[in-house]
Image (cartoon, rainbow, N blue to C red):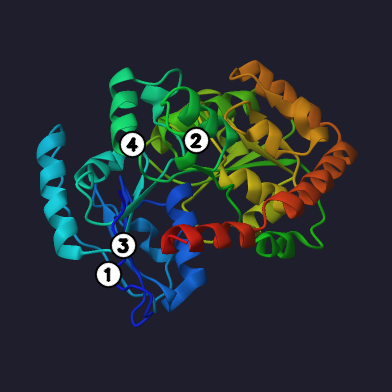
Amino acid sequence: MQPASRFGASGDSAPLVAHVFPSFAVGGAQVRFAAIANHFGPAFRHIVVSLDGDLACRERLRDDLDVTFPDAGATKNAMLANALRFHGKLRAWRPDVLVTCNWGAIEFALANLLPVARHLHVVDGFGPEERAAQIPRRVLIRRLALGHSPVVLPSRTLVTIARDTWKLPPRVIRHVPNGIDLGRFAAAAQGTQRGGGTPVIGTVAALRPEKNVARLVRAVAAVPGCRLVIVGDGPERPALEALAATLGIADRVSFVGHQAETPDFYARFDLFALSSDTEQMPLSVIEAMASGLPIAATDVGDVRPMLAAENAPFVTALDDAALAAAIRALVADAALRRRLGAANLRKARRDFDQAAMFAAYDALWRGT
C-alpha cells in the first residue's frame, strides 16, 4: 500500500523526493540522477542520502537545486536496527516519494514496509559478490521489500532477473532504459580527425575491481602500435599503474584521473573499450556511441543489444585474449572503425535520447 502525497493535488509546493544511495560517488546511477534532477530544476525538492558518506557526485548538481544531504547514521551488519532507525528518519523527513538504489539501500526499503512514503526502487546492477549468481538471502529480502513497489530497471537482463529469479509481480516491474544528452557528445566529436597517427583506445570507468580495467591493460599489452587512455579514478589505480609498468607499456598508458566533463576525451579516442566483469546498461557505452566510436567490450548485461548490429563481432567473452583480438582488429582497420562508429551513432540517436528517460522519471517521481 502506497500512501498519498501530503501535497495532494493543489500543487502548492514542489514534491519532496528522498533518494538513498549506497554511495553518492560518481557512478552511473548517481550521474543519471544528477541529469534528471538538473533537468527538472525547481519542479522537485530533494533529499540525498549517501550511506557511505561519499558525496563526490554533488559536483554534478545545479547550484540552484533545493537539495539537502542528511547523515542517515547507518551501522554495518545491523539490518534490523538500521531499518528501525531509518523508519524514524522517514517520519521526520516526510518525503512524498522514497527512491532507493541497488542492494546497498535495501534497509531503507525495509524501513518503509510500514509505509511512510510512496516507494520505488532502482536497480542498476550488482557488486562482484553477485556477478555470477544471486545470493539466496538477498533474493528473499528483495522479494519481501520490493513486492509492492515499482522497481525500475534500465536493462532487459535485469528485467529477466527481477521476474524470474526474484519472482517480483509483473505489475511492479518498470523497464526504463538509460538516456543521455546525445548532442553534447556528438558536438564534441564533430570535425574530429580520427584514423591518423597512433590509434588511441579509451575507457571511462571508476577504477574498482568489478570494472576489471586490468583485463584491458593486459589486452592492450598484447596489441602493439596503440595507446590506452584511462579516464577515471578509484582504489585500483595504484595496482593498474604497477601492472602497466610490469608489462612494459607504462609509456603507452595514460591515467588522466577523474574528469567531471568527458565529451572532449571521447572525441580524442579512436575506439572505446569496456572490460568489466559485470554491467547492465553502462552510460559510458552510450556516451561512446554518441561520440561516433566503435566499441570493443566484454559481453555483460545489455551491452551486445545496445550496440549496432555491425559492432556485435567485437563483443567478447570475459577473457584477456578475446578482448585483445577485438581491439587488434579495430586498431588495424581505420575504415572499419569509421563504419562501426557511424552505425553506433545512428543507434544511439534512435534508442538513447534522454527525453524518454526524463518523461518516465517525471511520472515515477510524481506517481502518475
Asked if the residues shown at circle 3 and circle 1 are in contact, with their CB atoms under 8 angstroms apart, the answer is yes
Amino acid identity at mark 3: Ala
**Image point (44%, 39%), residue name:** 207
Q: Residues within 10 Å of mark 4 (few under 14, many from 20)?
A: many
**Image point (40%, 34%), residue name:** 236
Q: Compare marks 1 and 4 and give the one earlier in the sequence.
A: 1
Q: Compare marks 2 and 4 and give the one earlier in the sequence.
A: 4
Give the label on residue 103, or none: 4
| Towards the viewer: 351 or 264 | 351
Q: Nearer the viewer, mark 3 or mark 4?
A: 3
Q: Nearer the viewer, mark 1 or mark 4?
A: 1
C-alpha span from label 3 to label 2: 22 Å
Q: Secondary structure at mark 4?
A: helix
Q: Residues within 10 Å of mark 1 (few under 14, many from 20)?
A: few
Residue that protrudes farthest toward the bottom in the picture: 12
Judging by the rendered image, the residue that carries numbered circle 3 is 4
- Image spot of residue 25 (x, y percent): 36, 51
| Towards the viewer: 298 or 4 | 4
Q: Secondary structure at mark 1?
A: loop
Q: Compare marks 2 and 1 and give the one earlier in the sequence.
A: 1
**Image point (20%, 45%), residue name:** 111
Asked if the residues shown at circle 2 and circle 4 are in contact, with their CB atoms under 8 angstroms apart, the answer is no
Judging by the rendered image, the residue that carries numbered circle 1 is 6
C-alpha span from label 2 to label 4: 20 Å
